[in-house]
Image (spheres, helix red, strand yellow):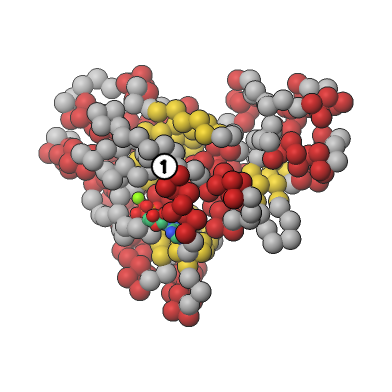
């Protein structure tokens, strides 16, 4: 996917950069805005600019209304190589898996990618990220229930449990979780010979509807994590910069290698988010250790995210970081690395 910056977008639209900024800030054309110290950078999928120009004559550009993209254009906008599934994981809780997974999913949706966010943690935090709702009896747990009872499962059955989310400028789908998910997942061990394949079996039925499936995983080894890894093409490791986390990283890496060895399914670590970073010497030491580990494993995408109360604030308000940033009307640097990663993945796809 070709992504253009502000100046090239302005040129194509035959507008000044101020006018173009206005159009992009109103999200008339889907885009991602990235704050930097000197000036904001915009990332705009070129295909959507071409489309805007196709349906509106050039001199009408100033009167842009929100783009309603038709199916044919959406088809050309699909990932060339099919759906990509990515798990955000760590064996430790409270490091920011849910925050980063939900924001990554939202950013992808802002770029008009078709996104499904799957919550595989029975704490159901990502299910509640965009609205404070509970999904008892309406979650992925019911799908596992049906599977263990050997009920017929098809795409329509899965779709019954998918919740459409429309938030500000983006649309995405959610396959929510609930508290009893862990129990039914463990129970499935006694029913199936290859229980780790069961999430993949569910997602296979609906994967053609999406460009990206984002899985938020539980903070422990166990079948839910194995199922998530088996269903994934990539893993993004989310960690904090603490002693225990550095050890935990190697353990998670071993889990991932086990999946590859035991099942022949290729899943690779694609990125590491070092989260909740404070300005302290000891954090510096752990960041270096994690960066070295990444280097030795050939992981190129290493991001750091500062510790900031904005995370909790935005989560309590159920607002993704990029939208909260607008509300605060200031630059929110903590949102940047998640944005960069989303843009990079969207461009690759
Ligand atoms: N960079 C950060 N700075 C400060 N707080 C953060 C940061 N990232 C996440 N948090 C907060 O830490 C808590 C745990 O985050 P969460 O995403 O739920 O972690 P996990 O899914 O790994 O358990 C949440 O309250 C969240 O708002
Ligand atoms: Mg979580």
310 vs 107: above or below? below
In the image, taking residue 318 as reference, residue 135 lies left or right, namely left
Which one is in front, 146 or 36?
A: 36
In the image, taking residue 148 as reference, residue 317 lies left or right, namely right
The residue drawn where x is 51% and y is 44% is 320
- Estimate the x, y position of residue 124 in percent, counting from the top left: 31, 42
Q: Is residue 341 visible?
A: no
57 vs 343: above or below? above
- Residue 286: image quadrant is bottom left
53 vs 1: above or below? above
- Estimate the x, y position of residue 95 in percent, counting from the top left: 38, 59
Residue receiving disc 1: 129
335 vs 160: above or below? below
Question: Residue most toward the left?
Answer: 190
- Residue 52: image quadrant is top right
Badge 1 density bin: few <14, some 14–19, many ≥20, Cα 10 Å: many
The residue drawn where x is 78% and y is 22% is 56
């Amino acid at each position: 996917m070709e992504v253009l910056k502000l100046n090239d977008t302005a040129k194509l639209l035959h507008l000044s950069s101020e006018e173009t900024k206005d159009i992009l800030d109103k999200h008339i054309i889907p885009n991602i805005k990235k704050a930097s110290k000197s000036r904001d950078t915009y990332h705009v999928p070129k295909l959507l600019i071409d489309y805007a120009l196709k349906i509106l004559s050039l001199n009408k550009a100033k009167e842009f209304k929100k783009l309603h993209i038709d199916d044919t254009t959406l088809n050309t906008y699909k990932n060339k190589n099919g759906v990509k599934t990515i798990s955000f994981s760590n064996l430790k809780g409270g490091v920011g898996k849910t925050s980063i997974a939900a924001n990554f999913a939202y950013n992808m949706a802002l770029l008009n990618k078709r996104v499904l966010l799957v919550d595989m943690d029975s704490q159901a935090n990502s299910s509640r990220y965009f609205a404070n709702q509970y999904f008892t009896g309406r979650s992925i747990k019911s799908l596992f229930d049906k599977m263990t009872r050997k009920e017929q499962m098809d795409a329509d059955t899965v779709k019954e449990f998918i919740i459409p989310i429309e938030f500000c400028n983006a649309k995405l789908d959610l396959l929510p979780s609930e508290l009893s998910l862990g129990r039914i997942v463990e129970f499935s061990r006694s029913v199936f010979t290859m229980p780790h394949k069961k999430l993949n079996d569910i997602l296979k039925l609906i994967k053609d509807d999406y460009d990206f499936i984002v899985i938020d995983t539980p903070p422990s080894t166990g079948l839910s994590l194995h199922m998530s890894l088996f269903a994934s093409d990539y893993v993004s490791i989310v960690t904090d910069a603490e002693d225990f986390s550095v050890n935990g990283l190697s353990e998670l890496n071993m889990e991932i290698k086990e999946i590859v060895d035991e099942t022949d399914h290729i899943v690779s670590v694609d990125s590491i988010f070092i989260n909740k970073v404070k300005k302290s010497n000891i954090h510096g030491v752990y960041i270096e250790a994690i960066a070295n580990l990444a280097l030795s494993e050939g992981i190129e995408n290493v991001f750091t995210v500062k510790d900031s109360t904005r995370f909790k604030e935005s989560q309590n308000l159920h607002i993704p970081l990029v939208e909260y940033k607008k509300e605060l009307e200031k630059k929110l640097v903590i949102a940047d690395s998640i944005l960069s990663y989303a843009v990079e993945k969207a461009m690759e796809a």
